[in-house]
Image (cartoon, grey):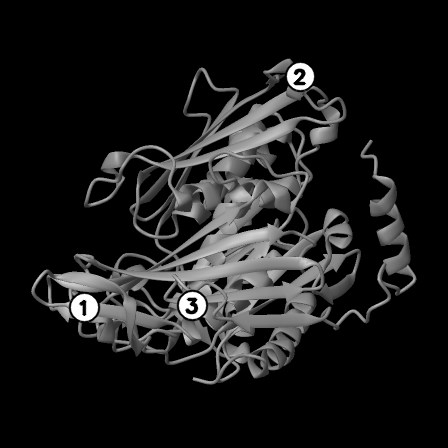
Amino acid sequence: MVTLKPSESYVRKLVEEKVRIDGRNFDQFREIKIETGVIENAEGSARVRIGNTMVIAGIKADVHEPYPDTPNEGFIVVDCEMVPFASPEYEPGPPSPESVELARVVDRGIRESGSINTEKLCLIPGELVWGIHIDLHVLDNDGNLIDAAALAAIAALLTAKLPLYDPDTKKAVYGKHGEKLPMKDRPVEVTIGKIGTTLMIDTNAEEEAALDARITIATNEDGNICAIQKGGNGYFTTNELEAAVDLAIAKGAELRAMLPSL
Amino acid sequence: MSKKVGAPEALIVDGKRLDGRSPNEFRPINIEIGTLKRANGSAEFRFGNTYALAGVMGPRPFHPKALQDPQRSIVRVNYAMAPFSTKERSKPGKSRRSTEISKVINEALANVIFAEDYPRTGIDLFLVILQADASTRCAALNAASLALADAGVPIRDLVVSCSVGKVDGTLILDVAGLEDNFGDVDMAVATIANQDKIVLLQMDGIITKEEFMTLIDMAKKGCGQIYDMMKAKLYEKYVATPAEEGA
């Protein structure tokens, strides 16, 4: 027998009655706040709050050798740290599978949408390129971390400025900001949760404890899909997937409207 | 996006793919069940050159004892690529990619395993990619389902998986070889048997909603075909043929 924690069964019971535990509509986000430029030492940064959830994204750029298959392009690296004070369930140590998945799903949205013109990040073809490190810090987890982290990442990227490059030392000169990052698109991610047969966006921590499955859909400026990740133990039917895609496109446009322009 | 180094001129020529397949065609599929002797259950699954081997250990007492779940078996999935499985040697050990794939495969299988029948135990699934030529997570998941069945772990039905994608503007089944490196879209899908229940879904690349719905449909049909093949193999191994049964 599977036993439910009290809040879990309560959330499920409410959803059956078409009510959310905090009274929102199923297609309604909590209040979203995006602040950019919150970390002066970072090339770009953003703090995103969705309800009580808080994630900070910081961008650092460094001079690297290119990857062999893309000798004339810069690259991005996304890492995620779930700071132990963000949730009683977190513990210090190596990244958990959840943390790895979050970083990789955010990475795919940014990468697959072609949001960064990586060819413009080439310093010396075949030799030196800019490596863009996107570090996500989850500071407070009240659910929907992926959407918050993806939003923080793109907001930070849109406002980031590269350090200066010193051709003599072949190193970055920090503290002096150069050009803006060559951004081409503004991908956003919307995660749709499923409890019973009900789909909802922006699940909070109580809802996530009761979740059957979730699906994260990244969309680009054109309203097309650029990455998908299903998570959780349950399943989606084809009709549910179609409804989720529609939600992700519509809600993604709302999120994009809150971002700095290209 | 710029063409990557080594990209071919075209991935589809005269309606045929580089390996001669039509868009909606699988590579040759090979299935072997019970190939390992010490594991409680095992299976091999191949899509062409992609070669996955799965072994199930358990249900067995879970250690450390303090972490046992008094209500259910703890299922752990470990997906790994053999260092010799790729053209350039893959670094052994855990990577972020393997961590993520292990997680989504575990979540897909959670839909069918009766974990609550085996409290305080662990079921360990070790999935090894012996040779990689795209769609490795799909092959690994199919092998895992068969290994669970071979081990006699009670499951509701088989989880089956295949990949779909888009190359040169064409929607294709069973992404392979250069299509994986240079295609536009790669999507892994798994369903429970031939039901409309999608338990694994990962996609990279830009597509419209309409293309996505078409790909889902192609993947579901593909999964249905694999399900029939996997079931036939299990029957072959464990059940007398209809003629022998006198049916």
As drawn, A93 above or below A105: above
Q: Residue at x 27, y 57 (%)?
A: B177
Quadrant that contains the C terminus of chain A: bottom left
Q: Residue at x 56, y 67 (%)?
A: A217
- Can residue A118 be seen here? yes
Q: In the figure, residue B176 lies in which quadrant?
A: bottom left
Q: Residue at x 72, y 22 (%)?
A: B119
Farthest-out residue, left? A168
Quadrant that contains the N terminus of chain A: top right
Q: Say yes or no: labels 3 and 2 on the same chain.
A: no
Q: Where is residue B47 drawn, in percent x and y?
A: 37, 48
Residue type, numbered disc 1: Tyr
In space, the residues marked 3 and 2 are separated at their CA atoms by 41 Å
Q: Which residue is mark 1?
A: A165
- Of badges 3 and 1, the one in the foreground is 1
Residue type, numbered disc 2: Ala
Q: Where is residue A43 drawn, in percent x and y?
A: 36, 66
Q: In the figure, residue A240 lies in which quadrant?
A: bottom right
Q: Which residue is mark 3?
A: A110
At numbered mark 1, what does the secondary structure look like: helix, strand or loop? strand
Bin the neighbour count of mark 3 within 10 Å (Cα to Cα): few under 14, some 14-19, many 20 and up. many
Q: Chain of mark 1?
A: A
At numbered mark 3, what does the secondary structure look like: helix, strand or loop? helix
As drawn, A236 above or below B130: below
Q: Which mark is residue A179?
A: none
